[in-house]
Amino acid sequence: MLHPMSVGRRSVLHYQSLVDRELIAELREIAADIRGMRICHVSGHGDGGGVSELLASTVPLFTDLGLHATWRVLGGRPSFFRAAAALHDGLQGAEVSFDGDLRRTFERYSLLNAGGMDGPYDVVVVHDAHPLGLRGSVEALDDATWIWRCHLDMSTPAPWVFDVVRPLLDGYDLSVFHMPQYAPAEIVPEPVVIPPAIDPLAPKNMGLPRPDAADVVARFGVDPGRPLMVQVSRFDPWKDPLGVIDAFRAARTEVPGLQLALVGPRSLDDGAAEFFGRVVDHAAGDPDIHLLADPQRVGPIEVNALQTHADVVVQKSLREGFGLTVTEALWKARPTVASNIGGIPSQIADGSTGFLVDGPAECARRVVDVIRDPAGAAEMAERGKQHVRHGFLTPRMMRDWLSLLRRVANR
């Protein structure tokens, strides 16, 4: 059931014009010490979402640097993905159940997928909740180092998570988190910390001239000549699209003609259709609220165009692992207003590289401030871009991973 993903080829030299050359040299130096290391990354999905975007960028770079890197994706029926989604949500603190049927389904498909772990590998990196059960189900590969890469904020998980996850992690050698406070000490007393990053060469993040971006957004019925507020995120409760609409309506009373685009895929999990229906109802047919959820129409280039053209990008999440959509907006030098939660404050210094807010009212106020002061907002956005350049692009994250893998090899 486990199947390989094709990622093509890429070179670290392609990043030389975007980051310090010393960083590229450092990548090559570290990689030379572990040349030939065999690494397998395993994720729940092969497209859509930050994990798949991250792996599509980094796996070919590991190969370019002389390691043997592969990426495999789980297979299974919808019942498995429902069970894995419940575990995923519970890790973040959602009030969901992981009852007997769900848990048994998760364990059964973990065992079925484990049959595809043929190796040999020196390191296996398991990403998030869906493949977490693999380690206990794989009879071979005991000589490999197993790493769980958690991309979630687990600081306040559902109470049942401790009993479920602790035995699943018994066979793992290391756990990697975005930030140290995301790892509950009861389960992961000594997490490895590697902040995520975005790929500036990916279609979603590469430079796009603003006139071209304007042409793209016009195809969605957005008026390029009027101010635009954008949030890019899945349509789920954690991303608070209902609160974004409230903030938009409050801001529009001060900024006549303001438009809103909520951009992102609808989740395939149970309840997603019902929640998207709530968002549609909350928008109430407002012609200036654009709900762009069709992946056939809104791909990476379209997301790039909407962020690039936006007068202000918001990220009003209620919970956020790190907030790479904030990183994307900052990299495009767009004024950004985001919730003061999760990993977002590590990217935004309030009033310097963007604005941090609590609640729809404050979000609306900052949106108005940005649009009324375009010169000040542009200066702030440029500071945000430089902050991302130095801390949150792919080469920096590759350095962190290579350093960790070298430590693993030296153990």
Image (tube, rainbow, N blue to C red):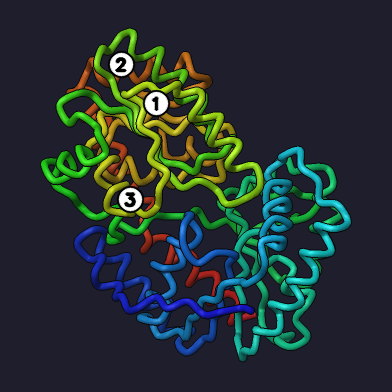
- Which residue is label 1 attached to? 355
Res. 165 visible in picture? yes
User: Residue 333: x and y, percent?
Assistant: 25, 39
Quadrant for the N terminus, please: bottom right
Image-based side of 89 in relation to 284, left or right: right
The count of marks equals: 3
* Callout 2 secondary element: helix
What is the x, y in percent for residue 216? Answer: 20, 44
For label 2, the residue is 369
Compared with 397, 218 (above or below) is above
Q: Position of residue 4 (x, y in %)?
A: 52, 80
Badge 2: residue crowd in 10 Å (few <14, some 14–19, many ≥20): some
Q: Do the residues bearing badges 1 and 3 touch, measured as CB atoms within 8 Å?
A: no
Compared with 226, 234 (above or below) is below
Secondary structure found at label 3 = loop
> Is residue 352 visible in the rendered structure shown here?
no
Please give the name of the residue rendered at 66% of the width and 78% of the height, measured from the top-left corner: 145
Q: Residues within 10 Å of mark 3 (few under 14, many from 20)?
A: few
Mark 3 vs mark 2, foreground winner is 3
Q: Which residue is mark 3?
A: 297
* Pick the front one: 138 or 392: 138
Would you place residue 28 above or below residue 197 in this image?
A: below
For the point 73% across and 78% down, which residue is it? 112
Q: CA distance from mark 3 to mark 2?
A: 32 Å
Inspect the image, locate mark 1, and give the three-letter code of the amino acid beneath it.
Phe
Residue 108 lies in quadrant: bottom right
Q: Residue at x 74, y 72 (%)?
A: 110
Disc 1 is placed on an element classified as strand
Amino acid, disc 2: Asp
Q: Would residue 140 appear left or right of 400 to someone viewing this image?
A: right
